[in-house]
Image (cartoon, rainbow, N blue to C red):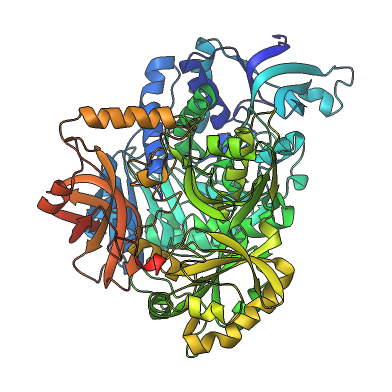
Amino acid sequence: MKSLPNQARVVIIGGGVIGCSVAYHLTKLGWTDLVLLERRELTCGTTWHAAGLVGQLRATKNMTKLAQYTSELYATLEEETGQATGFKQNGSVSVARDAGRFEELKRGASMAKCFGLEVEVISPREARELHPFLNIEDLDGAVFLPKDGQTNPIDVTQAMAKGAKMRGAKIFENIKVTGIIVNDGRVTGVKTVPSSSSSGENEEAESVDISAEIVVNCAGLWGRQVGMMAGVHVPLYAAEHFYIVTDEIGLPPTLPVLRDPDSWIYAKEDAGKMLVGCFEPKSKPRSLETIPEDFSFGQFPEDWDHFEPAMLNAIHRIPKLEDAGIHTFFNGPESFTPDDRYILGEAPELKNFYVAAGFNSIGIQSSGGAGKVLSEWIVNGHPPMDLWDVDIRRFHPFQVNARYLKERTEESLGLLYAMHWPFRQPETSRGVRKSVLHDRLEKSGACFGEMCGWERANWFATESMEARYEYSYSRQNWFEASASEHRAAREKVALFDMSSFAKFIVQGYDAEKVMNRICANDISVPPGKAVYTSWLNERGGIESDLTVTRLREDVFLVVTAGASQIRDMAWLHKNIPDEAHVSITDVTSGYAVLSIMGPESRNLLAKLTPADLSNEAFPFGSAQEIEIGYGNVIALRMTYVGELGWEIYVPTEFAQDIYDKIIAIGNKHGLKLAGMHALNSLRLEKAFRHWGHDIADEDTPLEAGLGFAVKLDKPGGFIGRDALLRQKEEISKSKNTVLKKRLVQFALENPEPLLYHNEPIWCNDKIVGDLTSGMYGHTIGTCLGMGYVSHEDGVSRDLLESSIFEIEVAGEKHRARASLRAFYDPKSERVRM
């Protein structure tokens, strides 16, 4: 037996398909001093029993790109390594039983066109020609992806392991990691023991420590527990996953994979047999405490009562199954995350500790892409593309709570095949984080949505409505209610509860110097001044989009989106020098935020405060401590809706009284409570960017139209300045002296279709980008969208005015006006009223 080394540049924990992919891709990048440790045998946990489907179309653009790469990798692995993989590309057929599902499939097919993924929208009859065993009597339509495939999970994992070993990686089986070694906030190694000793078979075996620069947690089902060893939050939970394999029934080897999400099932040919699996609406979570320590190539007891409804659905869709014998009933564990997206990246709590886990039953089809981008992240110190969808920093510490995870997992497995309606809200593990105003908003008709555990009012039901969603791809039941909230902000005054904002206090002798280095804008301003700014990476990409308010000479208030709270705090810590005299305090829970917006906001607030709210005394972009009711608050004159207004930061214990006083006089000024949907429609009319959608770490402020919030000439510079200077130099050398990629606003000529995101942008019959955001603009009277347009000769005003632009929605193109400026109040005169 090979002896364990006591040192390696990288240690990978876990020998499933993900761990082997990370090892394979790291060695391809030239990092060969790495050790992979598997507690039992390669593939033994979840990988070995995976169905082996290799689909390419995912919910978002970048996730689809990673799945697409996985398919391309599997097609070449056998030739490279000599290890058979069983990979074949017979395509897949996804069927729709009603108009809603068919629209979902068609919208996905439209998105796929943006990056050349082969996809065909087909009729039920054409679906049966591809899959002759299909019952099509109740189908509306289908989508065919010719390059989708299937593979043997064990073989493809062994192929990547072989490829890694061919380039120098060392792989050890039957080695259990018992601890993570940490020193001064960074990982420095792992503690190991032979697996046999942990079960009492070899009590004399000694622990071996391996020092390492990098540790990667690819422990699959055990990823949460390995994270706990390091003090890192990895929110995932096991669920039982079921499939059956029939006796041999004469299926042709060229049969495409079938997905019938309305029936909860997928089916594939397997050596003349048929494998049928399901993602049922309510799953069976499985605590790791009920899984034996030595679990390896194991399975759980059969549960026909649980599987029977899915099997009956399968027989309806594939009648040939009714007379087929059952060769195998399989029930084994898969790991799921709270939002059905996997976990990737460097842990915010611990430097050089990376995670790739929680793959929600799509590990085989994701492994190639996930291993590739994580390896590039490790080698280069940053992700190679926008990976916010799966970034570990999207999760909050509470989300490792076992009860929260168990209840959410009951739902999340089924959500893989549930309808992915626009604005769909999870139903389980709700009510975790509430504003102190929650009960008041609820009594006023709030319909709440969930964001990172926060319950936020998305819209308010009128007296004749029930505060619940009725989902569809067209105008949902809340459309008119949200429209009235939108109009109140434009015409009178609206009140938004924005307590979910993330709020940090940065203070110390070096606070100005450090913050000015992190911020692209100049925050060397007098106390009482608020600055809108970006935080950039060394490539000029936007890491965060936020406001920084100078409260005192050495005290700054940072306000950012609630969704990026953990990410932004980690970015701050990462970029504060060790020797700097700076401290950061997360005060998110300490302040409620009342956003009072609209042309009547000054008149309303003037009744509640002795402060002078005039333009001269309280100009836009300033902050003051003022009295409201019986409390003192921080009033920030800033807006995300494009109207006169103030964000009021209220110490939590004063918030209810101040809220009540605002409501008491609100009727005299036309006050309406407003929710997140109205906020979104208002900000899109003003072309205000939303980080994570319209701007991300691969977009620069120049491309995003945010150059006004960058001070290239400020003393000391800032992170990302050199990259922006290079980009400006390239622009000056180009033929038309304009950027080749720019964020553009669009307004549909037809007011009926609704836009959400990822819809293709056509320019003169050529796809030039896709939408990053979409929402109906009630003031403009049509649906609006934003998205990046790319054009080799530059995205100029002349191009936008002289070209024919169309937005594709579910396969149909709709004419659109294009603009580099906001469709509403482009000069921002109203915010300075």
Left or right of residue 4, residue 609 in this image: left
In this view, 598 is above or below 355: below
In this view, 342 is above or below 377: below
Give the x, y percent position of residue 377. Answer: 51, 28
**Residue in front for this viewpoint, 81 or 444:** 444
**Residue in front for this viewpoint, 321 or 234:** 234
Residue found at x 44% / y 58%: 314
**Residue in front for this viewpoint, 131 or 537:** 537
For the N terminus, the image quarter is top right
Left or right of residue 490, residue 33 in this image: right
**Residue in front for this viewpoint, 133 or 101:** 101
Give the x, y percent position of residue 200. Answer: 87, 27
For the C terminus, the image quarter is bottom left
- Residue at the outermost front position: 616
In this view, 412 is above or below 293: below
In this view, 764 is above or below 124: above
- Which quadrant of the structure image shows residue 796? top left
- Residue at the outermost left position: 802
- Residue at the outermost right position: 204
Left or right of residue 49, residue 793 in this image: left
Give the x, y percent position of residue 97. Answer: 35, 65
- Which quadrant of the structure image shows residue 74? top left
Residue found at x 73% / y 45%: 288
Q: Is residue 402 visible?
A: yes
